[in-house]
Amino acid sequence: MRVRPMPGVSVASVDATGRLELLTETAVGSGRYRCSPVGTAMWIALRRNEGDTGAAAHMLAELWNTAPENARADLDIWIEEMRDAGLLCAQPSP
């Protein structure tokens, strides 16, 4: 599966503690969403791997020195939370 930011979602900043702030601009209005440092790492891994969840999970497993299936499980949970919040959407794999 590949995921991408929903239209209107942009990165505002990453602070010194590693917290990512996302901004949303939609027809309904604007909003802010803050990610923990772990969420920030997941966002970066997904963006660096063009939304490829498998590649992002592998990258995170190497960074965190953990089993790839554990990183993938954590990533999948986070992606669902981000999808529920309207920040990410799935797209068909090429």
Image (tube, rainbow, N blue to C red):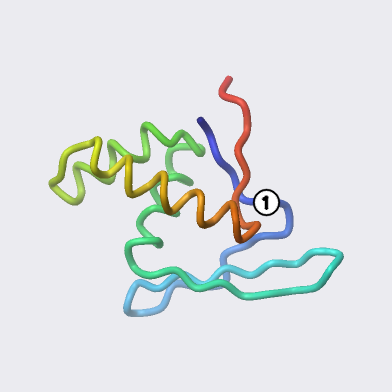
Residue at image location 63% in from the left, 44% down from the top: 89
Measuring from the top left, give residue 46's x and y in whole percent.
45, 45
Residue at image location 58% in from the left, 51% down from the top: 83
Extreme residue toward the top, this view: 94
Residue at image location 50% in from the left, 39% down from the top: 51
Measuring from the top left, give residue 77's x and y in whole percent.
41, 50
Q: Is 71 in front, or is 94?
A: 71
Q: Toward which corner of the image does residue 91 lie, by quadrant?
A: top right
Query: Helix, strand or loop at disc 1?
Result: loop
86 is higher (above) or lower (below) than 92? below
61 is higher (above) or lower (below) than 43? above
6 is higher (above) or lower (below) than 3? below
Extreme residue toward the right, this view: 27
Measuring from the top left, give residue 38's x and y in whole percent.
33, 62
| Residue type, mark 1 in image | Met
- Number of numbered labels in the structure image: 1
Extreme residue toward the left, this view: 65
Please state if 69 lies on the left or on the right of 55 as rendered.
left
The residue where tag 1 is placed is 6
| Quadrant in the picture for the C terminus | top right
Please state if 71 lies on the left or on the right of 14 as rendered.
left
Q: Toward which corner of the image does residue 87 lie, by quadrant?
A: bottom right
17 is higher (above) or lower (below) than 58? below
Residue at image location 60% in from the left, 50% down from the top: 88
Please state if 67 lies on the left or on the right of 25 as rendered.
left
Measuring from the top left, give residue 20's x and y in whole percent.
46, 69
Q: Is 15 in front, or is 3?
A: 3
Dot 1: within a 10 Å radius of its alpha carbon, few (fewer than 14), some, or many (20 or more) residues? some
